[in-house]
Image (cartoon, grey):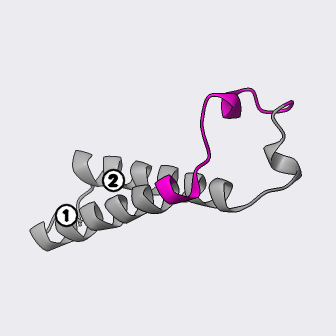
Amino acid sequence: MALTLEAILYYIFVLDSSVYFVMSHTAGKFHKKSKHHLLDKVPLNKLFALIYIGHVIWVGVSLHRLGIL
């Protein structure tokens, strides 16, 4: 299996959607706005996280069926 540009971009999106999903479904001391200034601009919505990871999985299945992954 050769790593193509599409595969690399897909794995970056998998990592991004996984981190967003975990951050939106967990709450704790790591999510305080005083420590993370970037989180002030990013809304953590559970429904959006579920839709986002669902779309990433759907694209992954499509890329796998095309033989890219």
Residue 64 against residue 4 in the figure, above or below? below
Question: In the structure shown, which secondary structural element does the residue marked by tag 2 occupy?
Answer: helix
Give the x, y percent position of residue 23: 67, 54
Instruction: Say whether residue 52 is magenta.
Output: no
Drawn side of residue 5 relative to residue 33, left or right:
left
Q: Which amino acid does label 2 sit on?
A: Tyr
Q: Which mark is residue 16?
A: none
Q: Is residue 24 visible?
A: yes
Residue pictured at 23% horizontal, 49% vertical: 6
Tell me if mark 1 has few (under 14), some (14-19) or many (20+) residues whose alpha carbon lies within 10 angstroms of its own.
some
Question: In the structure shown, which secondary structural element does the residue marked by tag 1 occupy?
Answer: helix
Drawn side of residue 7 relative to residue 34, left or right:
left
Q: Which quarter shows the N terminus?
A: bottom left
Instruction: Say whether residue 39 is magenta.
Output: yes
Q: Which amino acid does label 1 sit on?
A: Leu
Q: Which quarter shows the C terminus?
A: bottom left
Give the x, y percent position of residue 7: 28, 55
Residue 3 against residue 33 in the figure, above or below? below
Earlier along the polypeptide chain: callout 1 or callout 2?
Answer: 2
Magenta segment boundaries in residue numbering: 34-48
Q: Which mark is residue 10?
A: 2
**Type of secondary structure dominating the magenta stretch:** loop
Asked if the residue at tag 2 contacts the one at tag 1, i.e. Cβ–Cβ closer than 8 Å, the answer is yes
* Residue occupied by mark 1: 63
